[in-house]
């Protein structure tokens, strides 16, 4: 199985400051169809997960543009340009290139 | 509005069985592959099982293969997960989630609120 490794696992951030989460895969996520299937999810406290970004850098409808995704191959990053209170929660990366689909361990974003 | 509402979670003894249901509304259910993802208490997300839009293709994580069965009834807009031979390590919130038209490669674009399964004597 493809192992997804996120860092850091805990990320205290000052309001209005940027935040960055790394996600690394044990195998390349480049698919034979030319796409790279790395997705990001947000889980706010007490809520279900919500997809934020798909295929590395495509934001879902309604996701603020302060969220951005980048990367290729085995190294990916989720960035929040200016953290707001509503961004508190756990963020998961997930690969969709290989079976079985696998998630990272999660990164907990909290306000300092 | 897309809605996914899970039900059927409960306290069950080890070795027991349970059937989870997920009622879908707000979209054409038969046009989407569907999946179950679970989350053990205080832990991360784990993909459990998926099925294609017609229910003819089913996929399972190694941890549940042979014990769980995913199915769907498109006439009732409902997804199911039959769970047999339950173990303590199956204790989790079980989420039903919808795949986008492109399939699971792009993750899951809508999630239910989850239903809690507790396996304990």
Image (cartoon, coloured by chain):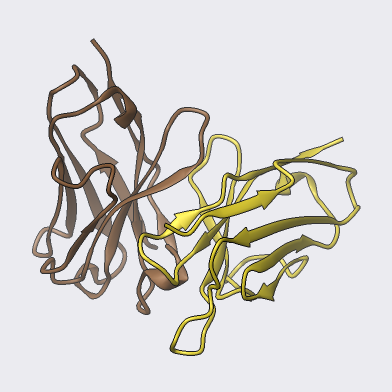
Chain colours: A yellow, B brown
In front: A14, or A105? A105
Q: Count the marks: how many? A: 0
In front: A3, or A7? A3
**Looking at the picture, does residue A80 appear above or below residue B22?**
below
In front: A87, or B52? B52
Residue A92 coordinates in the image, percent (x, y)? 58, 52
Residue drawn at x 35%, y 56% as measured from the top left = B97
Residue drawn at x 78%, y 65% as measured from the top left = A66
Q: Quadrant of the image for the C terminus of chain A?
A: top right
Residue A11 coordinates in the image, percent (x, y)? 78, 42
Residue B35 lies in quadrant: bottom left
Residue B31 lies in quadrant: bottom left
**Looking at the picture, does residue B76 appear above or below residue B29?**
above
Q: Judge from the rendering whether residue A59 lies leftward or rightward of residue B74; answer left or right.
A: right
Residue B85 coordinates in the image, percent (x, y)? 14, 30
Residue A74 lies in quadrant: bottom right
**Looking at the picture, does residue B55 appear above or below residue B6?**
below
Residue placed farthest to the top in the image? B121
Q: Judge from the rendering whether residue A11 lies leftward or rightward of residue A56; answer left or right.
A: right
**Looking at the picture, does residue B94 appear above or below residue A7?**
above
Residue B59 coordinates in the image, percent (x, y)? 22, 60
Q: Quadrant of the image for the N terminus of chain A?
A: bottom left
Residue drawn at x 47%, y 81% as measured from the top left = A31
Residue drawn at x 33%, y 28% as measured from the top left = B89
In front: A60, or B2? A60
């Amino acid at each position: 199985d493809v192992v997804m490794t996120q860092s850091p696992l805990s990320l205290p951030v000052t309001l209005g400051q940027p935040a960055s989460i790394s996600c690394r895969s044990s195998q390349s996520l480049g698919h034979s169809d030319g796409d790279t299937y790395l997705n990001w999810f947000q889980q706010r406290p007490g809520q279900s997960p919500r997809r934020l970004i798909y295929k590395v850098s495509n934001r879902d409808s309604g996701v603020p543009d302060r969220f951005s995704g980048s990367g290729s191959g085995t190294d990916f990053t989720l960035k929040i340009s200016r953290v707001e209170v509503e961004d508190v929660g756990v963020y998961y990366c997930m690969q969709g290139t290989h079976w079985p689909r696998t998630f990272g361990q999660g990164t907990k974003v909290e306000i300092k | 509005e897309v809605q996914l509402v899970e039900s059927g979670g409960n306290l069950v003894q080890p070795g027991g069985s349970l059937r989870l249901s997920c009622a879908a509304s707000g979209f054409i259910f038969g046009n989407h592959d569907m999946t179950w993802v679970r989350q053990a208490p205080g832990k991360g997300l784990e993909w459990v099982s998926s099925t294609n839009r017609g229910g003819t293709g089913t996929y399972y994580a190694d941890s549940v293969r042979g014990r769980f069965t995913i199915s769907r009834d498109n006439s009732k807009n409902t997804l199911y997960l039959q769970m047999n031979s339950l173990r303590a390590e199956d204790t989790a919130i079980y989420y039903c989630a919808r795949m986008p038209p492109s399939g699971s490669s792009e993750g899951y674009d809508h999630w239910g609120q989850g239903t809690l399964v507790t396996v304990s004597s």
